[in-house]
Image (cartoon, grey):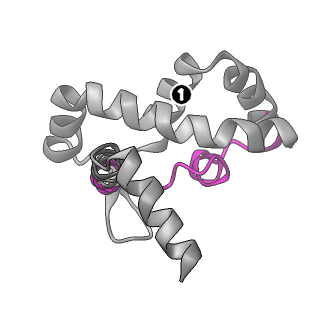
């Protein structure tokens, strides 16, 4: 299970990147054909079969691991839960954009501070 725990964080990012890059056809599939599943946060995601197919193609290590999952169980929904992919990708993309914006703001703020002024402020703090 160590391999799975190592793969989980990258799987989420790979799935979100794939979803974002392919929204042009995934979104209509979900809306027009009701090809989606509800999520715990009252959202929705593509059906498990589609997610499993996409991530198996994106990550060869996972493709091998999925073989063992299907030997134990063919419950696609449960496999998606175990992989940590049972979430609304739209909501996760929004969270990811907010997080990136926050990081960029912090980096911009930090880069705009004059190192000499920062050094002087540090000395002033130490002398208080």
Q: Identify the residue position indicated by label 1 in the image.
A: 55
39 relative to 114, above or below = below
Q: Residue furthest front?
A: 127
Question: Is residue 87 in sight in this rendering?
Answer: no
The residue lying toward the viewer, choosing from 114 and 104, is: 114
Q: Choose between 112 and 99: the one closer to the eye.
A: 112
In the rendering, at what x and y percent does residue 96 appear? Answer: 36, 49
Q: Local crowd at mark 1 within 10 Å, few (<14), some, or many (≥20)?
A: some
Looking at the image, residue 63 lies above or below residue 98: above
Residue at position x 54%, y 17% from top?
Answer: 57
Q: Position of residue 23 (x, y in %)?
A: 22, 32
Return the residue nearer the eye: 62 or 113.
113
In the rendered image, residue 103 lying in the magenta stretch gets the answer no
> In the visual, does 58 lie left or right of 40?
right
Q: Quadrant of residue 72?
A: top right
Residue depicted at x 29% and y 55%: 98
In-image side of 115 versus 52 (left or right): left
Give above or below for 105 relative to 126. Answer: above
- Please tell me which residue is depicted at 72% across the width and 21% down the height of the picture: 61
> In the image, which residues are magenta?
71-98
Query: Which residue lies most toward the bottom here?
Result: 128
Relative placement, left or right, of 66 versus 114 is right
> Residue 111: where, in percent of width, then height?
33, 43
**Percent of width and height locating residue 78:** 64, 53
């Amino acid at each position: 299970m160590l391999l799975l725990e190592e793969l989980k964080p990258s799987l989420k990012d790979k799935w979100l990147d794939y979803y974002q890059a392919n929204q042009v056809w995934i979104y209509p599939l979900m809306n027009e054909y009701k090809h989606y599943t509800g999520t715990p946060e009252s959202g929705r995601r593509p059906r498990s079969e589609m997610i499993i197919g996409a991530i198996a193609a994106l990550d060869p290590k996972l493709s091998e691991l999925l073989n063992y999952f299907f030997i134990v169980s063919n419950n696609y929904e449960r496999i998606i839960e175990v992989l940590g992919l049972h979430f609304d990708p739209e909501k996760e993309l929004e969270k990811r954009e907010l997080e990136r914006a926050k990081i960029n703001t912090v980096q911009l703020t930090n880069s705009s501070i004059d190192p000499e002024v920062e050094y002087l402020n540090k000395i002033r703090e130490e002398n208080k």
